Image (cartoon, rainbow, N blue to C red):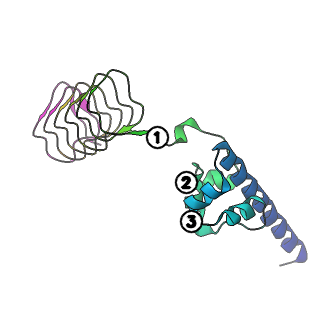
Amino acid sequence: MTEKNKTEQANVSTNEKLELGSTIKKRRKQLEMTQEELAKKCFVSYQAVSKWENNTSMPDASILQLLASALKMSVDDLLNGNTELDESKKTKTVYGNIYGKITKDIHGDVKIVFGNIDADIYGNVLGNIIGRANNIFGNVEGNVLGEVKGDITGYIRKNLLGIVHGYVKKGVRGKVLGSIIKDGLGVD
């Protein structure tokens, strides 16, 4: 390798380090996170985070995924310096169990539906549906024991023992002992 090539490679490495440090710092501040909070999420010391941000060292490649996740961004965005807050990449809200009656749409994942949701769920149901819901724009990871008054755009991972009045786009992975009324069952 010629001396010119070595110098060019060193300059690229220095520029990448400068960009990565400023990306980490900018994103951490966007998320209103302290160096100590970021350090805890990455299982390193706050001094290590400070060194990254001041470009005196770089994070080890083995923790880039963890660092990107803590900063709520992809590894590609982290390495490319893209700190734009993309609404579609935000962490989705996860609600607990639904026991009562809800009349407004839910934008996030729900654990278990025991009550009645007289609205749509824009997310996944992580457990069972024992109560009732309108449309579900996501998957049902548990059983459907209750009633879905509209469509499920994803799949039902376990069993359908209740009623779906619309369409289950990606099918039922378990047994169908209940009913799918109207549009039927899709299979990808």
Residue 85 drawn at (x, y percent): 62, 39
Which circle's residue, 3 or 1, is located before the other in the chain?
Answer: 3
Amino acid identity at mark 1: Lys
Q: Which residues are magenta?
A: 162-188
Disc 3 residue crowd, few under 14, some 14–19, many 20+, Cα 10 Å? few
Which numbered disc flags the more N-terminal residue, 3 or 2?
3
The residues bearing labels 1 and 2 have C-alpha atoms spaced at a distance of 13 Å
Q: Which residue is mark 1?
A: 92
> Within 10 angstroms of label 1, few (less than 14), some, or many (20 or more) residues?
few
Disc 3 on helix, strand or loop?
loop
Please say if 121 is above or below 19.
Answer: above
State whether residue 3 appears in this view.
yes
Q: Amino acid at mark 3?
A: Phe
Instruction: Please state if 60 lies on the left or on the right of 175 as rendered.
Output: right
Q: Is residue 55 magenta?
A: no
Q: Which residue is mark 2?
A: 69
Q: Residue 100: horizontal and vertical position, in percent?
A: 26, 28
At label 2, counting other C-alpha atoms closer than 10 Å, the crowd grade (few under 14, some 14-19, many 20 or more) is some
Residue under the point 66% across and 52% down: 34
The CA distance from mark 3 to mark 1 is 23 Å
Mark identifier at residue 72:
none
Q: Residue furthest left?
A: 177
Q: Are marks 3 and 2 in contact (CB under 8 Å)?
A: no
Residue 95: quarter of image: top left
In which quadrant of the rendered image does the N terminus lie? bottom right
Q: Mark 3 or mark 2, which is nearer to you?
A: 3
- Secondary structure category for the residue under label 1: loop
Identify the mark at residue 43; answer none if there is no mark.
Answer: 3
**In the image shown, does 82 or 1 lie closer to the viewer?**
82
CA separation, marks 3 and 2?
A: 13 Å
